[in-house]
Amino acid sequence: MTGRPAGFLESHLRARREGGAKLLVPYVTGGLGPRWTEVLAVMAAAGADAIEVGIPFSDPVMDGPTIQAASQRALDQGTTPTAILDALPAVDAPVPLVAMTYYNIVYRNGHRRFAHALASNGVSGAIVPDIPLEELAPWARAAGSEDVETVLLASPVTPDDRLARICERSQGFVYGVSVMGITGERQSLAQSAGVMAKRLKAHTDKPVLLGFGVSTPAHAVEACAEADGVIVASALMRLLLGGASPDQIGDTVATFRAALDRG
């Protein structure tokens, strides 16, 4: 895990895309239950192209009720950023891992120290959604010095000039927010999802993935009509909060994988 090559996240996703695959990135909240690392392993075995690992924060402003509940349960169970990262090298998940957390965690640890902790535990990328583009440089320098790729987000209301700057600065992939609002399951994929993907792909050749509201395999297929892939979070964490086993989570990821492979 710790011996990952520089640029592993983007190079791996590009290779999968160029091989004809639509990209699947499931999410798991770090520290959620004693078997959370098993969830990582089964996600990889079920066909995940990368895995997003949430490092819980007490005020997850971009997350909806499911991820909030998962984060709070993990915190109540005593998890810490250090405990989550320290557990990763032992996980049998040979795909890129991407840490998602909030800037308070980064700031409290210090940019260089946090970037080093990610890299030394095999994490290839980082999503820190509450760092504005204009204030990204200090973190980006620290992350870059450790070969941690910083993934940036763009929303449906991001103007084109700013969208171009986000695409230029983002590493690994560009995270397209499919709908305005917070994370969470939805009954249908927002019409803005396809538009978002088209706008991003007009500005970049980096992999473009859509998240926020991708709740079913059908949603994933619909999103990938324009995007290179999807991020699936709340639908999986709802199952885990409800007592699903790692194998059951793996089975669900496998249904997303199969749907994307069928197209």
Image: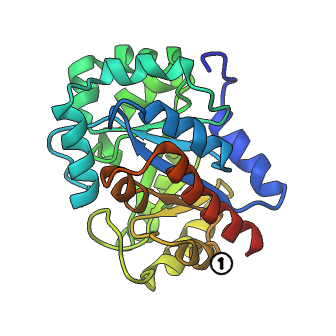
Image coordinates of residue 90 in percent, x first then y, are 55, 18
**Colour convention of the picture:** rainbow
| Residue drawn at x 62%, y 64% as measured from the top left | 255
| Residues packed near mark 1 inside 10 Å, few (<14), some (14 to 19) or many (20 plus) | some
Image coordinates of residue 184 in percent, x first then y, are 32, 65
**What residue does disc 1 label?**
225
Viewer-side residue, 107 vs 89:
89
| Residue drawn at x 76%, y 73% as measured from the top left | 262
In the image, taking residue 20 as reference, residue 6 lies left or right, namely left
Is 213 above or below relative to 130?
below
| Residue drawn at x 50%, y 40% as measured from the top left | 39
Q: Quadrant of the C terminus?
A: bottom right
Image coordinates of residue 108 in percent, x first then y, are 20, 21
| Residue drawn at x 63%, y 72% as measured from the top left | 224
Q: Quadrant of residue 115?
A: top left
In the image, taking residue 134 as reference, residue 94 lies left or right, namely right
In the image, taking residue 105 as reference, residue 251 lies left or right, namely right
Image coordinates of residue 25 in percent, x first then y, are 56, 52
Is 229 above or below relative to 179?
above
Viewer-side residue, 185 vs 208:
185
Q: Can residue 115 be spotted in the picture? A: no
Q: Quadrant of residue 6?
A: top right
In the image, taking residue 134 as reference, residue 90 lies left or right, namely right
Amino acid carrying label 1: it is Ala
Q: Quick one: SS at disc 1? A: loop
Q: Quadrant of the N terminus?
A: top right
Q: Can residue 71 be spotted in the picture? A: yes
In the rendered picture of this protein, how many numbered marks are placed on residues?
1
Q: Residue furthest right?
A: 19
Is 32 above or below relative to 224?
above
Viewer-side residue, 4 vs 89:
89
